[in-house]
Amino acid sequence: MLIEAPRGTQDILPGVSANWQYIEQTMRDICRLYGYKEIRTPVFEHTELFLRGIGETTDIVSKEMYTFTDRKERSLTLRPENTAAVVRSYLENKMYAESLLTKLFYIGPMFRYDRPQAGRYRQFHQFGIEALGAKGPSIDAEVIILAVQLLERLGLTDLNLYVNSVGCPECRPVYREKLQEYLKGKTEELCSDCQSRFDRNPMRILDCKNPQCGEASQGAPHIVDCLCDECSNHFEQLKILLQAANINFTLNPRLVRGLDYYTKTAFEIQYAPLGAQSAVCGGGRYDGLVEECGGQPTASIGLAVGMERILLALEKQNLLPAANNQIDVFVAPMGKETQGMAFKLLCDLRKNGIIADMDFMDRNIKGQMKQANKYPARFVAIIGEDEAAQGKVMLKNMESGIQELVDSSEVQNKL
Ligand code: ATP
Ligand code: MG
């Protein structure tokens, strides 16, 4: 019996790994432009970190975590997202002592017990950035603009950026009460998840994917109408900065996070053709999280991009670069006697940075030419017995068909 990959996981096969490298490189290039440096944290952390850093009332913690105990009975969890881990590392490594503002990015696998479907997996990958230490709206604008520029550079169109403000621990409780007041008579209409959210985390009812909950909360008050002066000014400034940068956005009062340490700016970028998995990027401010994790109050903001969804969008828009398997030269010995010389030539070429290959399957010359065409190879270095005796090879330009007898030490210069 063959063993299959676990449900919700995918192999990234050689035919598509170049696509991954392409988007990862674009992400790295953008981060270099904006001054975000890479951080790599472990794929598992103490479960406690996510309980505190994501919140027990969230879907992620309440039903999506891969939690296990190790041999010493410690509870560990495969990271479902990376912000909490970055904050943990920021504090543990005292990065705050190095500079007032710390700008980091990460790329890597995340794990959630989600219901697998197109664009939703149990092991998936995120690119994310975190800016820790700055409280003004210009860093919010920078983070959003970075995401927009990334998606633009990949060539994606038809994306929608939604922004909202979720207030702060000063003004949110007032809104929360207003919202509960509004929903009080409608709890019967809510899905069972939202019924339990009503007390614990009512704001999450607003972004429930269940249409009946959307209907029930249709006329609910908007948090932007309840913001305190500070949050309201912050939001106004952000909108001005985005407009000045020519960024198109739509206000979406239903975009929420709903936990105390998520503050002010919340945003999401959607690509509608991905249906229920339309969110390609989500982010926001988390001014209370560093303190929640045991540090000094540190205003921060970040985002995460779902890489599989980016690839789906690129595929839909036909934007993936064509595969490039071309090699510089294929070395083709004719007969056993010339194999040693062929192998030495292959090694020398590679040592000098020439992309070269040869047959390892004892194919005859016809089979080898076929293989060379398949790559395709720009040149084939044919080594027959006569040529070998003189230390020469027949170098064939595969495009023009022209052949030339050259010294084997000269092959590299001829390419
Ligand atoms: P969704 O509402 O689609 O479940 P989310 O709110 O759980 O998304 P975030 O926690 O904000 O997502 O994660 C940021 C991004 O990571 C999402 O916008 C999405 O692109 C991607 N993402 C989240 N969960 C998955 C998953 N299970 N499989 C693939 N990508 C995912
Ligand atoms: Mg989710």
Image (cartoon, rainbow, N blue to C red):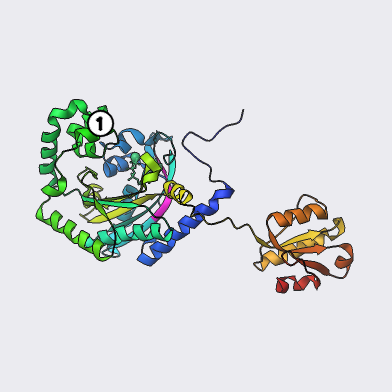
* Vertical arrangement, residue 23 with respect to residue 123, above or below: below
- Main SS of the magenta part reads strand
Quadrant of res 28: bottom left
Quadrant of image for the C terminus:
bottom right
Judge left or right: residue 174 versus residue 286: left
Measured as percent of width and height from the top left, residue 281 is found at 35, 50
User: For the point 35% across and 52% down, which residue is it?
Assistant: 159
Question: Quick check: can you spot residue 117?
Answer: yes
Q: What secondary structure is marked by label 1?
A: helix
Q: Nearer the viewer, residue 49 or 28?
A: 28
Measured as percent of width and height from the top left, residue 200 is found at 19, 34
Per the image, the residue denoted by label 1 is 212
Measured as percent of width and height from the top left, residue 377 is found at 70, 61
The residue range painted magenta reads 106-112
In reply to whether residue 190 is colored magenta, the answer given is no
Ligand 2 placement by image quarter:
top left
Quadrant of res 101: bottom left
In reply to whether residue 108 is colored magenta, the answer given is yes
Question: Quick check: can you spot residue 95?
Answer: no
* Vertical arrangement, residue 156 with respect to residue 122, above or below: below
User: For the point 28% across and 33% down, which residue is it?
Assistant: 211
Quadrant of image for the N terminus:
top right
Quadrant of res 246: bottom left
Q: Does the closest atom of ligand 1 sit within 8 Å of the Cβ of label 1?
A: no
User: For the point 84% across and 70% down, which residue is it?
Assistant: 391
Question: Which amino acid is tagged 1?
Answer: Gln
